[in-house]
Image (cartoon, rainbow, N blue to C red):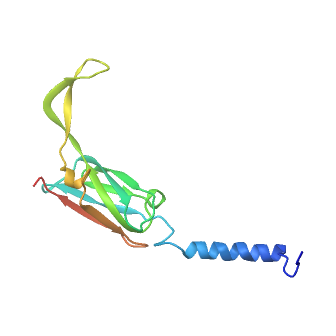
Amino acid sequence: MNRSWIPTRRHSCFGLLLLAAIASTVGCGDNRRQGIEGTVTFDGQPVPNGNISFIPQGDARGPTAGAVIKDGRFTIDRARGTFTGTFRVEIVAARETAETVADPVTGERVSLREQYIPAKYNVQSELTAEIEAGGSNRLKYELTSK
């Protein structure tokens, strides 16, 4: 057996450090989560209640992130935010209609709710966000019914 090079504990530690350094530089964007905040209006009015989601696209790494929209505003803190990159944005909001239906559990009549945000802003979303490292990441979405 050729013993011209036998790894020692020192070599192993150096190798692990080198591997860790390479791994930390591979990939795109910042390795820290970013906070995101912003506003959402629909036909010029703040969305009273809804949800917003950020889904990684292209080279952006997960995780996805989301928040509740309340009175047209949303906030995602850094601990629950995304990494940097391009994200597809989906916005949903429901409102009560004049129609009522029977609650399947209680049998009580309740108002039927409808998704009123057009599909081009959610299931077929055309919205994107570019999340930057250390940036303000303040976003503004002005949605319309047309």
Horizontal and vertical percent for residue 80?
A: 45, 56
Q: Which residue is depicted at the point 89% across and 74% down?
A: 1
Residue sitting at the far bottom: 4
Q: Residue furthest left?
A: 146
Q: Residue at x 18, y 50 (%)?
A: 118
Asked if residue 126 lies left or right of residue 25, the reply is left
Furthest toward the top, the residue is: 107
Q: Quadrant of residue 87?
A: bottom left
97 relative position to 74: left or right: left
Above or below 16: residue 112: above
Q: Residue furthest front?
A: 1
Question: Residue 28, position in %: x, y?
Answer: 46, 72
Total marks drawn?
0
Please give the name of the residue rendered at 29% of the width and 51% of the height, measured from the top-left corner.
69
- Residue positioned 22% across, 42% down in the render: 94
Q: Quadrant of residue 24?
A: bottom right
Q: Which quarter of the image is occupied by the C terminus?
A: bottom left
Residue 126: x and y in percent read 23, 60
Residue 128, given in percent of the width and then of the height, sits at: 29, 64
Q: Is residue 85 left or right of residue 38?
A: right
Q: Is 132 located above or below residue 69 in the figure?
A: below
Question: Left of 12 or right of it: where is 79?
Answer: left
